[in-house]
Image (spheres, coloured by chain):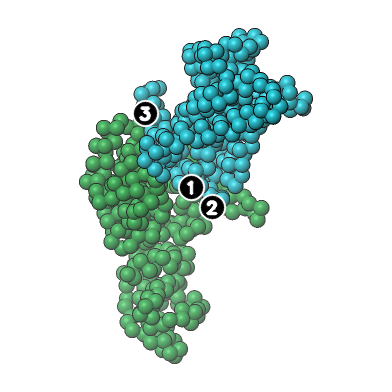
Amino acid sequence: MDVVRWLRRFWAAVWLTWKEQSNWTKPYIYILYSMITPFFSVLVYAYIYVAIAFFSGLVDLERAYYLVTGVSLYNFIGSGLYGLIWTIHSEREHFRTLKYTYLAFPSLHLYLMARSFFHFILGAIYAFIMFLAGIVLTGYPIDALQPNIMEIAILMILGYIWSSQLGVMVAGTSIFSSEYGPLISEAVGGILFLAGAVLYPVSTLPPFIQPISYIFPMVEWMELMRHALNPAYVVSEPNSLYLILALKTFLYLVISIIYFSIIERLTRRKGYLEATLYH
Amino acid sequence: MKPAIETINLVRVFSSPRGEFRALDDVSISVPNGIIYGLLGPNGAGKTTLIRILATLLLPTSGDAYVGGYHVVREAGKVREIINLVSGGERPGYGILTVRENLMYYGQVYGLTWAETRRKIDELDGLLGLSDFLDKRLNRISTGMMQKYALARGLINDPEILFLDEPTLGLDVNNARSIRRVIKRLVETGRIRTILLTSHYMAEVEELCDYVSIIDRGRIIASGTPDDLRRMVEKEIIYDVDIRLRDVDRLKFLPRLDSVIGHTIKTRQLSGEARIRMILSSEDIGTIIRRFEDMGIHVLRVRRSEPSLEDVFLKLVGKGITDEEEKESME
């Protein structure tokens, strides 16, 4: 396999997403916008925390850390996931280029991963800004943080792999429903937000939801990220969590490859690559 | 030597709650290397379905198809490496990008380097004349420019086999002529080895194609070189009759006449004139003219004509291809 050629293709798809996202303005305004948006998002959550703390008189910094890391890190997963699933919709319905992409890019699966890469980078930037702003706004002691950069990098890579595979499976499903495709992506994003240890631990969820939480690698990923950013955040048996996360990521990869190849074949059978059902 | 394209008993059935529609019915064609192969037929005849299958966008219901020797179902990836597709009336790119950016993008997606893609764009500019709109956004260019861009995009990877699906659809006469000139040059210069072109413009197929198959309702009804096909009607008597008439419905009696095998009517809305092309079984034009005059239809000209591919279609199917074709050839 010609790796350089593949990287060139991958890069072209990343560049296209950048153009698609930023075409409405000048690059520096877009970068400014990308930094301001998460800042104002975290303001909402920080305000909720501060308001509750103020009226109840309870200041729980551990809770604040959980909340801030949850909503910040969710941006990384959510942005990439939405971006990937949206690619199918925008290519087929808006630009009507999906069939040309299919002919030009040797693997639609990899193409979707490449197109989502920019969203993951954007999500990482959002997460970083929200995390810093959230920590400052909630009054969490910054000097207590001792981020392990290597661990964070590994977790980001694992996060990119599992969530992009989840995105590929959802995107594949959405090929069959042009009308409801974007809703499917929002539904999956919503489930992850609610059941993925973003705002509250899984143990606090109703018992019938808890098994759903463990279908996704999000719970292990969130917990390990919190621990990697701040070793004072205690997780029980981090090594086991790493192992579970790695296994789930691998499983997601295998399942999405099989699932997407089945979907691809069904799509060709139905002729849905060119079908524009919505507009 | 293996043919560039081959289909064997190809069938494609579309199912819907309203029933089944047989878009391709037992289609077998063989396209040798190095030619422009034309697929001629009216809208809905199955031309685009066949191209979609050959380009690996659609699976056949049954039968086999090979492109460049590769099976379109089992070796779809290999097929995609050696082909490209240009469809008329579409925007095969991103409106938010300029023409140059689109070509740069597709070049790299096909695996070319930045420098190779730039060189290729310069080359394509020389061939197609893109320079006037290379730096315009794709959503701001005219239909003629769009089709030149579409062709440039289709050539960016130097495909061995190029599928052209109605490449001049919706273009004015000058733009259509310029696109046709380029298509011809592509094969003459050996830049593209084989082209499969679909069209419902008779003149286009006659001008460009070395070999033609006529398709109607999913079936190939005749195949051969344009001369072979014309020979099918060399014994027929063909007349063009120009009349002054606005209400075409008054000509509904024509198919009922025993001597009329088939006919087409081309109207000129502005002048209120119409041209009727008729294939007759006997030299009985006098009776028909008298019938026109009895009905008060003013006959302007009567001319005996040489057979064309249009007449082959007319003879085989009993009607012309479409109104659009008629408009174009009259302008």
Q: Amino acid at mark 1?
A: His
The answer to which of A215 and B223 lies nearer the viewer is A215
Q: Who's the residue at 49% across and 27% down the image?
A: A129
Q: Are marks 2 and 1 in contact (CB under 8 Å)?
A: yes
Badge 1: few (under 14), some or many (20 or more) residues near its Cα, within 10 Å? Answer: some
Q: Which mark is residue A279?
A: 2
Q: Label 1 lies in what chain?
A: A
Helix, strand or loop status at disc 2 = loop
Q: Check disc 3 and report its element: helix, strand or loop.
A: helix
Which residue sits at x=38%, y=80%?
B272
Quick one: SS at disc 1?
helix
Q: Position of residue A132 (x, y in %)?
A: 51, 24
Instruction: Identify the hue of chain A.
Output: cyan
Chain B shown in which color? green
Disc number for residue A168: none
Q: Are marks 3 and 1 in contact (CB under 8 Å)?
A: no
Q: Which residue is mark 1?
A: A94
Label 3 belongs to which residue? A8
Q: Callout 3 environment at 10 Å: few (<14), some (14 to 19), or many (20+)?
A: some
Q: Is residue A181 left or right of residue B44?
A: right
